[in-house]
Image: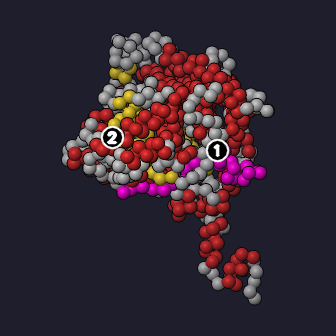
Amino acid sequence: MAKDKRSPEEHSIDPAAQQMLIRAEQLGLGTAFSRADDMAPCNIGSAGMCCKMCGMGPCRLTKDGQTGVCGATIDTIQARNLTRAIAAGAAAHSDHGRDMAFLLKAVANNEAEGYAIRDVAKLRTVAAHYHIYTENRSPQDIAKDLAELYISQFGQQHGQVAPIIRAPEKRQQLWKKRGVVPRGIDREVVEALHRTHIGDDQNAEHILEHAIRTALADGWGGSMMATDISDILFGTPAPLLGQANLGVLKKDMVNVVVHGHEPSLSEMIVAASQDPEIIAYARAAGANGVNLSGICCTANEILMRQGIPAAGNFLHQELAILTGAVEAMVVDVQCIMQALVGLAQNFHTRIITTSPKVQIKGALHIEFDEHKALTVAKQILKAAIDNFKNRGETHIPDVREDLIPGFSHEYINYMLGGTYRASFRPLNDAIMTGRIRGVAAIVGCNNPRSSQDYLHTKVVRELLRQDVLIVQTGCGAIASAKLGLLLGEAGLDQVGPGLREVCETVGIPPVLHMGSCVDNSRILTVLTQMVEEGGLGDDIDQIPAVGLAPEWMSEKALAIGTYCVASGAYVIFGGSSPVSGMPDRVADSDIVARYISEGWEKAYGGKLEFVPDPDEMIRRTLAHIDKKRAALGLPAYDPTRFGRSGDARMLELEKLPLAERQAALYGMSNR
Ligand code: NFS
């Protein structure tokens, strides 16, 4: 093994991944893991010091005082690069939201075969936010108005995007004062591209203010709308039992893996896979039916709502094909590696692209059309079933874990207070007393530059021990799921005493899986509701909470991080920083890194930092939580104060003789 090649154990801490990486090596096949070893990142580009905005360059600024051919300084170049990345991320999430809005409209007009409005209560709640009249109106009529309103947010030129009103009042005022309220989603993305074109905005801080506005158009715009509509059409998630990892693939069935992001097609494939016609078709092909599973955020969408198992997160996409057991990998948009097609040629797997926006050379394209989605879904499944006969040798790792996903903000509200007094009061109280030290949202991607799932699960495990309640989405949630951390009470032995008491009392796992990456908007809603409940200040930046993306890699992650900062959160990214600069060589190359931390904190109360070392990530998270607790006048965190009640205490007491138990429980004396 060459010196810079890592072993399977170094590439991933997931035993299923390690097995598949050994198989890849035996077969002489490359994966993202081996390609990352072979391709060192460009140290100038990765530090944000390369400008390729025009044909006079690319310009690489590696010396003190150096500028681009046009005179652009290092901070301008870094701010432009970061802002473009945030705009691309916001565009991806929001375009997903746009398609969901078109789908809602088609469903409302009875033009979408196979779909229905599944959650009328959520439709009414969302419509009421915008004063859409709901009394005595059919769900279709309300949905038409909501779809029109949401569609209009993309091309809107003035005013503010509608969901902004769902943020805490004080935050809205701050955004207004700073002039960063997004006017229309497309407008902000276009303006980000305009401002970063050669010869435009050349004041780093001014460029970055627009990055904030663009990111807000994602979090409090496109992403929030995508989540709303997915819930309305497919049901608001509630806890259910699921499974994760490659061991969910089945040897005796036709394995179809859906991969990408949009629930519109995958939900229909779920429906089609249960259709008697498809089951009979699979049986006739010699299989025991169709076994569906997911990769990436599509996995999260159908796991949260239907309990369809997750075959894995981002870095599992190639590994699933290496099992030799996948008849079809059906992809739509985002996070799909082009390498899938070449890899699949070594097996029988068909890569099927479905989005009018995404084709991959060499893949089979069966285009999704919401007007005849069930028909298309059946066509896709039949192509997969027809491929079953071509299957060769299979190697499915016998590795899978159970998990309980499905924690929408609606469900968290309900579980804390029940049907009649649903409320965030118990959560706020638990934070105020110190039973829960604070909250961490641990989200985002896998990155083959680090060891798959290692950073995610290291941070999760340590923060749980420190009584920090964790919410997760995206590939981070699947990382924890694969390692058995989303297991309800079974995971409680890894949790600090105060948090454990709360989990036992409420009956929740200490890590709450809240959905896909667009569902980070649910986290914004939870934070807002915590503010509105009272006791934790009057804005999000006062809550003892931190957001982390330990293994980030996508532009979408940067957009998410930035809208969380703009909403008041401290956000820590692991891995490398796209604006790190090389301060030892170019003195001014960390201006932007300092500005998005100290500058944004002054302006928004939230800050964005890139911290490669997980121990340092944990240290900064806890320090921030403790700082926010102190600012609110809450008691300092004390791990010895709690843990003497709840189930743990009862189990302890059960071991005592009756008289002692009674004395402990009721203060009765046996004298
Ligand atoms: Ni989020 Fe989902 Fe995963 Fe990262 Fe990609 S799947 S939208 S971007 S890699 S978490």
Q: Amino acid at mark 1?
A: His
* 15 left or right, relative to 192: left
Q: Is residue 505 above or below residue 366?
A: below
Q: Is residue 320 above or below residue 112?
A: below
Residue at 67 percent across and 26 percent down: it is 144
Q: How is the image coloured?
A: secondary structure
Q: Amino acid at mark 2?
A: Asn
Residue at 36 percent across and 57 percent down: it is 398
Decide if residue 611 is in sight here: no
Part of the protein shown in magenta: 398-422
* 296 left or right, relative to 585: right
Helix, strand or loop at mark 1: helix
| Tag in front: 1 or 2 | 2
Residue at 34 percent across and 30 percent down: it is 363
Point out the residue furthest to the right here.
135
Residue 459, horizontal then vertical, whole percent: 48, 50
Q: Which mark is residue 409?
A: 1
Residue 405 lies in the magenta stretch: yes
Sequence-earlier tag: 1 or 2: 2
Badge 2, how many Cα within 10 Å: few under 14, some, many 20+? Answer: some
Front residue of this view, candidates 633 and 166: 166
- Residue at which label 2 appears: 387
Residue 369, horizontal then vertical, whole percent: 50, 27
Front residue of this view, candidates 406 and 602: 406
Residue 606, horizontal then vertical, whole percent: 59, 36
